[in-house]
Amino acid sequence: MAEHDVTFDAIHETAERLAGEGRQVSIETVREELGGGNLGEIGRALAGWRAGRLEAAPTPDTGIPEPVAAALAGWLQRYAEDSGAPAREALAQSQADIDALLSAHGELENEREQLEIANTQAQAAIADRDETIARLDAELRNAKQVAMDALVSKAKDQLAIEGKDKQIDKLRNELERNVTESASVSDARLAAEMELVGATTARDSLANEVKDLRGQLDALHADRSSLRAEIEILRKRG
């Protein structure tokens, strides 16, 4: 039963039923029987119920029985005690209800304090989380900047490498061209030197042949001179 559905009449009826069954009538037992209800409302309703029971309680017979006339004083004492017992019981139960309300109030206060502690801890956790998020966001921005700087540096290095590769290719081409030209010059020089060697060899051979021819010519001249001399001698003899 929801708390707003509990009425004073329902509380009184439940209390009467519990009392008729000889069970204890208290805020807890009534609330348990009702399946819910506000503790304060149940307590006020039970206080009114107990006051009504006291008012409706039958007045003890004040007639003095003859058999007990001699014990009138003792009987009056017992009467006073008996007539005050319901009031004392109601007072004790009311005090028990008050204690129960105070205990429930203490439990509510304890729950409120626990909720405040949990709220404080949750706020601290949220603050820590926000701080962690801010730190991670800053680290992410720094990482992005570092990555961007690395990419820019790599691009610069790549451009520098490509420029150097172009320079190397240019120098390689020039070197190959120079080697080719040097080889051509060397080949021409070698050919010229070979021709020069051949010409020198031919010249030396021709000089030798000329020398031989001169030797032969000198020998022929000498033979002719000898022949003329012999002819002249023979002519003189004849």
Image: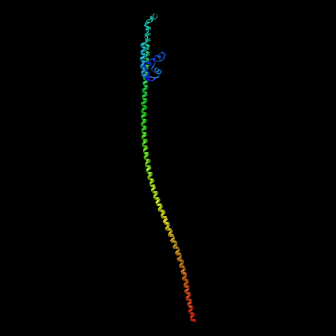
Q: Most extreme residue toward the bottom, as rendered?
A: 238
125 is higher (above) or lower (below) than 19: below
Against 101, residue 133 (above or below) is below
Q: Give percent across and percent down for residue 210.
A: 53, 80
Give the quarter of the image for residue 119: top left
Tell me residue 221's x, y (percent): 54, 86
Q: Nearer the viewer, residue 186 or 74?
A: 186
Q: Quadrant of the C terminus?
A: bottom right
- Give the x, y percent position of residue 75: 44, 8
In the displayed orientation, state which residue is furthest to the top. 66
Q: Nearer the viewer, residue 4 or 155?
A: 4
Answer whether residue 94 is visible to the viewer in this image.
no
The residue shown at (52%, 73%) is 195
Image colouring:
rainbow
Identify the residue at image location x=42%, y=36%. Answer: 126
Q: Residue at x 55, y 82 (%)?
A: 213
